[in-house]
Image (cartoon, helix red, strand yellow):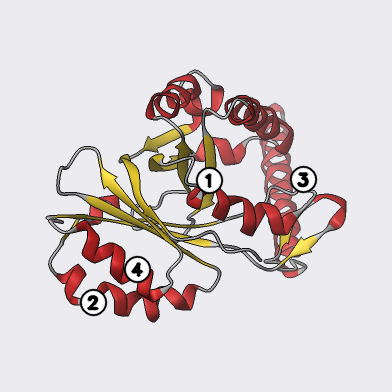
Amino acid sequence: MICQLRKSQSSDKNFSKYSKLITRVELRMNTVNNLKIDVREHGANEKTLNERLFFQLLAFGDCGNFEAIVKLLDRSKTEAVIYQDINDPKGIAVLVMNKDPDYFVTEWREILNSSEFNKLSSKPELTMLGRTYSSGFEPDLENWLIHKPRHSALNPEWPWCIWYPLRRTGEFSKLSRKDQGIILREHAVIGRAYGESDLAHDIRLACHGLDKNDNDFVIGLVGRDLHPLSHIVQTMRKTSQTSKYIQTLGPFFVGKAFWQSPLKTG
């Protein structure tokens, strides 16, 4: 009798667990079935914008004639920056930006297949591609997504740069939005302090599905001098996000602007 009772209780427990599992699956299915896709960028006060700026960084070696690349990009009216690679005396990197991704596989592709670029050797390990994005709190989406990152990249007073990709751990995605916000706010406070002191300014890009190494973000740090850019990376190492929730960081491109296209308005 006792054995039968125990078997019954065990069966009831298993049934209860199974029922709860079925309920969770049904809830998830209902969520998926009712899922509404919205790819717009969202800002403060329910503002939205379906525009963003794409950036691509391409690095090259064996550049013995910087002026030839400058003249080519200047003639093409490409919005771009040419950096001298601090770690390669014949190395450069070209940062290109455009709102239309088609540009990168049409006009920009033709420029890259020109005789001037064919003389260079590619460094694919330093290729980075990303898009500007919003976090939902920006009061002026157009400025945040288009004008601010363009100004940061093309500002002649901020020639030095450090560019790198990063990938968060899966554990970060499992945190609640509240806990994520606390962690990200720590980064934001540090970044704002360096920016307000005109020591370092960041260009933050999302690269989900755009990066061959499955990185999540591309970060560009720009400023008047190199040391503060290195210093902010050092400072960020102590934060919760970098110390606990970053899986990979880099490789890093470090350089100084040799040429920048004129900053366009609008």
Dot 3 or dot 4: first in sequence order is 4
In the rendered view, tell whether residue 80 sits above or below residue 165: below
Question: Does residue 126 appear left or right of residue 76 in this picture?
Answer: left
Q: Name the amino acid, label 1.
A: Ile
Point out the image quarter for the C terminus: bottom right
Q: Name the amino acid, label 2.
A: Asn
Calculate the distance from the C-alpha at mark 4 to the C-alpha at mark 2. 13 Å
Residue 30 image point, x, y percent: 76, 64
Q: Which residue is mark 4?
A: 73
Dot 2 or dot 1: first in sequence order is 2
Label 4 environment density (alpha carbons within 10 Å; few <14, some 14–19, many ≥20): many
Residue 93 image point, x, y percent: 29, 53
Dot 4 or dot 2: first in sequence order is 4
In the rendered view, tell whether residue 119 sits above or below residue 177: below
Label 3 environment density (alpha carbons within 10 Å; few <14, some 14–19, many ≥20): few
Calculate the distance from the C-alpha at mark 3 to the C-alpha at mark 4. 36 Å
Q: Nearer the viewer, mark 3 or mark 4?
A: 4
Q: Number of labelled discs?
A: 4
In the rendered view, tell whether residue 244 sits above or below residue 20: above
Calculate the distance from the C-alpha at mark 2 to the C-alpha at mark 3. 41 Å
Specify the label residue 113 is tagged with. 2
Q: Residue at x 70, y 33 (%)?
A: 181
Query: Given contact means CB atoms under 8 Å apart, are the residues at marks 4 and 2 in contact?
Result: no
Q: Which residue is mark 1?
A: 203
Local SS, label 4: helix
Calculate the distance from the C-alpha at mark 2 to the C-alpha at mark 1. 28 Å
Specify the label residue 137 is tagged with. 3
